[in-house]
Image (cartoon, rainbow, N blue to C red):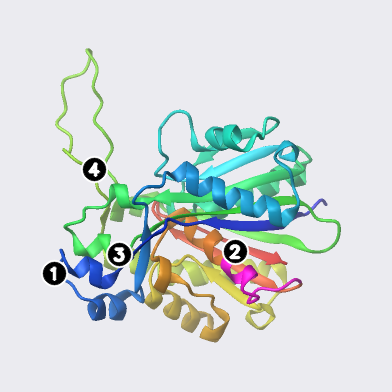
Amino acid sequence: MTRAKILGTGRGLPERVVTNDDLAEFLDTSDTWIRERTGICQRRIAAKETLLELCEEAARQAMDQSGVEAGELDMIIAATLTADHPLPNLSSSLQRVLGADNAVCFDLSAACSGFIFALTTAQMYIQSGHAKKVLVLGGEILSKIMDWTDRSTCILFGDGAGAAVVGVSENEEGILAADLGSNGKKGGVLSLPGRPVENPFRPAEKGPEKCYVHMEGQEVFKFAVSQVPASIRKLLEESGKSIDDVDCFVLHQANLRIIRSAAKRLKAPEEKFFINMERYGNTSAASVPIALDEGIRSGRIKKGDLIVLSGFGGGLTWGSMLVQM
């Protein structure tokens, strides 16, 4: 069976760094309060960049590292819930700026699990023989959907983009297995209202004046600390691998307490978990690819390492992947 392999990665981040002390200037909070509850010290906020610009930077880094030219791409898959425009979609806009004229382009939305969903989709296209080289992105400008008067949400999130070029593996390296899932019954605990339906044939609906993210933090926490370890265990069991075999866990960077709880439930040493949320916060679909790229470029993740990628979030959705680098 043809196996898909990550050939290169990249990330794009806004210039503006916003610290906890910056937030404390207009919120009833403090650096200590945020650090102790989340592990976040600062985040990047798009003060001037567009999501397309961040994704383009991430894509070009991934293409450069992989040695893949834009014209070689068969497909571009972008995971996001905060595209600059509903139309054209983000992936098609990327095709234009990259010059990837041969690529089929589409976006998908699975919130913080989006990159894993997109990477799995790329894997399936490659395994089926319908694509040979795919650009996968996770990108968000979450700052535009935050209520900046609500300290329970706005302190958590940041903006950014991450990318991976995926191709055909010529050996045993690559994506070994994936586990995806959804629980729509619990979807309301993490939501973002949409605009109401307005047309001449329907009574007017009163919608929210502004649409912001709403989150029931405790419910999301309970979901994450139970579902993530279960997904990872399932992934390893089906692959005939153990926790000891894994060199590095790259989880969605939502909250330090969630990662520590997952490590405890998996009975895995915390040292095996890559963490960068202190600098970037929760970047939703961008979280896993940004961490993956940073792990690779810092030398924490090396060729031959067995790694676990895992995302979880709105939907509610989750996705885990076992990768031989």
**Mark 4 to mark 3: distance in Å?**
21 Å
Q: Which residue is mark 4?
A: 211
Mark 4 Cα within 10 Å, few/some/many (few <14, many 20+)?
Answer: some
| Of the image marks 3 and 1, the number of the one nearer the N terminus | 1
| Of the image marks 4 and 3, the number of the one nearer the N terminus | 4
Question: Predominant secondary structure in magenta?
Answer: loop
Mark 3 Cα within 10 Å, few/some/many (few <14, many 20+)?
Answer: few
In this rendering, would 113 be left or right of 175?
left
Observer-side mark, 3 or 1, equals 1
- Say whether residue 298 is magenta: yes
Where in the figure is residue 287, as x and y percent of width and height? Answer: 48, 61
| Of the image marks 2 and 3, the number of the one nearer the N terminus | 3
Q: Which residue is mark 1?
A: 28
Observer-side mark, 1 or 4, equals 1
Where in the figure is residue 57, as x and y percent of width and height? Answer: 55, 50
In what element is the residue under mark 4?
Answer: loop
At x 47% / y 54%, what residue is drawn? 285
Observer-side mark, 4 or 3, equals 4
**Mark 3 to mark 1: distance in Å?**
23 Å
**Mark 2 to mark 3: distance in Å?**
30 Å
- Say whether residue 231 is magenta: no
Q: Which residue is mark 3?
A: 219
Observer-side mark, 2 or 3, equals 2
Q: Which residue is mark 2?
A: 293
Dot 3 amino acid type: Glu
| Of the image marks 2 and 4, the number of the one nearer the N terminus | 4
